[in-house]
Amino acid sequence: MAMNSTISTIEILPNELFIELFQYITPYDLYGAFFNLNSRLNILIKSLQNLHLILHEDWDNRPRTIPFFASQVSILIVKHDEQIDFSSYKNLRSLKLSRPTEIQCNAIQSSYLPYLEHLSISNFFILDHSKQLCSLIFSSALSHLCICQIDRITLDNNHSQSSQSLQQLIITPSTWKVNNYQQIFSSCPNLVYLRIIRLRNLSFQLSFAFIPIHRSIRSLYIRFYSLGNDWYKHIEWLLSILSNLESFQLIIDENEFNMEFSFDLFARLLTTYVPNLIALKVKLPLNIVLLNNSNSIKQLHSLFRTVDLSRDNNRDRNKYLFISSL
């Protein structure tokens, strides 16, 4: 007796499964493999509004043109230093420039990217081309921008605009020629999270002249590549104007100068300047701890609840001292 058999094809899949499948395929491969196969797939592909696109340095032998699906891209990562026209990416929500040039930075315009929410400019090892861009970031022009990472910051002394939308900021003050903190704080009244990464000592002086207290920042993350002579002054200066701080993380990767970390002074800073602090996490290299033991450290501040010596991860040979409020 002959057996009935059916031949299954991909077209029998429901639209919801196609849309889920398309999330795991790069836009170029998606259009190359599925576009123009039939009208149903064309409609589904054109309906996608959250494509993730990475423009590589070598471009994978693709022509250096704006892809025709640019308006469907919500996340764009640019890994080359060629000129790019952002006017076609009108629905972009997230943009990262890995090798930013002056032309690329100046190509970012509020009229081109009206819905931009997240901006990352990795320009630590690149010449500063950020003056025009900074005036845009720290203003009301990018009205949806809420998260920004930018290493090199250049602002005019008379910069008076502000961003009401910016809530999270990641900066690298060791790249600055002057102290930009005051201008940043005044330009970001609604900032709630500040992340500071220092790969070397500051090249400018921290002024203790009167600076208005920033009352919105609730979370501060500081990462020092190594402990420098000005670590105490830098932290004191910041905490003195962040009186409403609730969460504080201090990460120090190395202690190349074999300096001793004063837990007494650190505890005094927390008590004096941030009385509302409820969450604390500190990571210090082991050779920073010379004369202290865990019990004596715990007694210095009420948030020094857990003091532990361990490795940061299984691949790290170095041990660190961890202090936590948990």
Image (cartoon, rainbow, N blue to C red):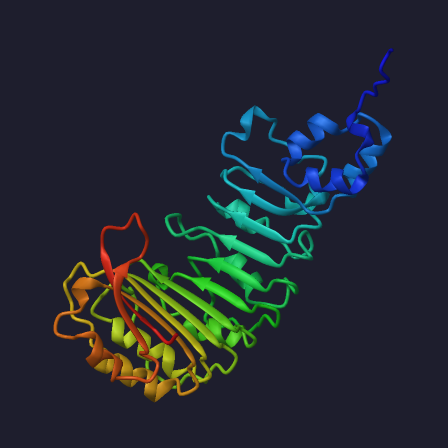
The residue most toward the left is 291
Is residue 86 among what the camera can see?
Answer: yes
With 265 as the anchor, is 141 left or right in this view?
right
Q: Which of 4 and 57 is in front in this view?
A: 4
Asked which quadrant contains residue 88, the reply is top right
Is residue 206 among what the camera can see?
Answer: no
Identified at 47% across, 45% down, the residue is 98
Asked which quadrant contains residue 117, the reply is bottom right
With 174 as the anchor, is 285 left or right in this view?
left
The residue most toward the front is 1
Give percent across and percent down for residue 111: 69, 55
Asked which quadrant contains residue 177, the reply is bottom left
Where 296 falls versus 4 (above or below)? below
Q: Which of 55 and 101 is in front in this view?
A: 55
Give percent across and percent down for residue 118: 58, 57
Give percent across and percent down for residue 202: 29, 65
Identified at 15% across, 61% down, the residue is 257
Figure disc tally: 0
Q: Specify the quadrant that holds the N terminus.
A: top right
Identified at 50% across, 38% down, the residue is 80
Identified at 49% across, 52% down, the residue is 121
Where 255 falls versus 59 (above or below)? below
Give percent across and percent down for residue 110: 65, 57
Q: Specify the quadrant that holds the C terminus.
A: bottom left
Where 271 falls versus 172 (above or below)? below
Q: Nearer the viewer, residue 318 or 159?
A: 318
